Image (tube, rainbow, N blue to C red):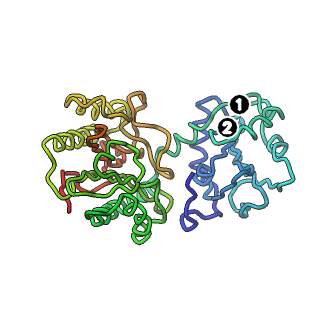
Amino acid sequence: MNTPDKDCFSPSGTLDLARARRVMDNLERRGMRQMLVADPMSIWYLTGYWNVPYERFYALYLARNEAGRLGATMFCNRLFPDATHVGARVVTFDDTEDPIPLVAEATNHDKPLGVDKVLAARWLLPMMEAGCASGYHLGSAAVDDARAIKDARELDLMRAASATNDRAMEWLVAQLHEGVTEHQIASGLLAEYRRLGAQDVSFTPIVSFGANAADPHHEPDGTVLHKGDLVLFDVGCKQDGYCSDMTRTFFFGAEPSAHERQVYETVRAANEAAEAIVAPGVTFAQIDRAARKVIEDAGWGPYFTHRLGHQIGLEDHEPGDVSSTHDEPVRPGMCFSIEPGIYLPGDTGVRIEDLVIVTEDGCEVMNSYPKQLTVVG
């Protein structure tokens, strides 16, 4: 997990009751009324309190009683930042104390307990031995589903992060000249993001020259840029806690061949076909299919080797992918990527990626950087 910049995340905060209630509503639909959240990012989402626990126990316990009243308890090592103003009961302990009996005092032993995917087995197994609940179920989806629907402020922050990413793309293109290496460009991007107002990268930048673009997750290396190379940038920043992500592909110093042009225009058509059908009620699988069909009809189906996209927000990759196996309908407030690609090993690779917000009647594309085929340098 990337540690947020201290300017983005404050150690102090207050429990967001609306978000907590959404989580509990989601949990109840899964047959549970209590949950232990161990993911620091989800705890921040619910409370505004940021902490990196490292190896120490750290969790937020949420429960709803039979009368419907919500209760919250935070378990914090005394080394952690002060959590007394978080809006929950705070239970503290030190390095010599076992936190599991403290958890057992808070939970309802006669009811099932939801736990999230971050809770380590070294804490979960002792909780099971201590009889903290009648059963234990993966409850991450209750939080993930809440985080998937962004509120108005979150959407504004997502738009701002994407606008910064658009401006950073202009800087990336300006760095292209014969003899520059992938690594040289990638290593300078963080400083540019900070100059533009972001605090960090949201993932390790992908800078690919020539045939390296045929590797979807190529790591920048010492490859030197030459005239006639294709250039792929897949980059994102983290700004005020929220992530951006965008991919653009360019041709450097020479017009592309007919073959390269055809690959590029096919990917662009796939990107635009998928964006055109995004609307409430359309499923993630249908959106994936809209893009994939364009590429298959052009004869490159086997070379589109990944899902169409992923949800995004506080983290670059959040649960809920845009894939052929995800039949959930999209809902207003969801944010995800549309990033089709064609990857021809040893030859060329093209990917074009935007982020979209699902609106009441369609979608908003958050990226304004042009997608038409462009020769630079």
Q: Image quarter for residue 61?
A: top right
The secondary structure type at the circle numbered 2 is: strand
Seen from the viewer's position, the closer of residues 70 and 342 is 342
Figure quadrant of the C terminus:
bottom left
Residue 309 got which mark?
A: none
Residue 136 got which mark?
A: 1
Q: Give the tally of numbered discs.
A: 2
Residue 142 percent across, percent down from the top left: 58, 38
Left or right, 157 with respect to 70, comes to left
Residue 369 percent across, percent down from the top left: 26, 57
Badge 2 is on which residue? Answer: 115
Is tag 2's residue or tag 1's residue first in the polypeptide sequence? 2
Looking at the rendered structure, the kind of residue marked 2 is Val
Looking at the rendered structure, the kind of residue marked 1 is Tyr
Q: Image quarter for residue 8?
A: bottom right
Seen from the viewer's position, the closer of residues 316 and 282 is 316
Q: Is residue 218 above or below residue 78?
A: above
Seen from the viewer's position, the closer of residues 45 and 68 is 45
Question: How would you rate the neighbour count of disc 2 (Cα within 10 Å): few for under 14, some for 14-19, many for 20 or more?
Answer: many
Residue 33 percent across, percent down from the top left: 68, 35
The secondary structure type at the circle numbered 1 is: strand
Residue visible at 63% across and 33% down in the picture: 138
- Label 2 vs label 1: CA separation? 7 Å
Question: How would you rate the neighbour count of disc 1 (Cα within 10 Å): few for under 14, some for 14-19, many for 20 or more?
Answer: some
Left or right, 173 with respect to 9, comes to left
Q: Are the residues tagged 2 and 1 within 8 Å (C-beta)?
A: yes
Left or right, 292 with respect to 104, comes to left
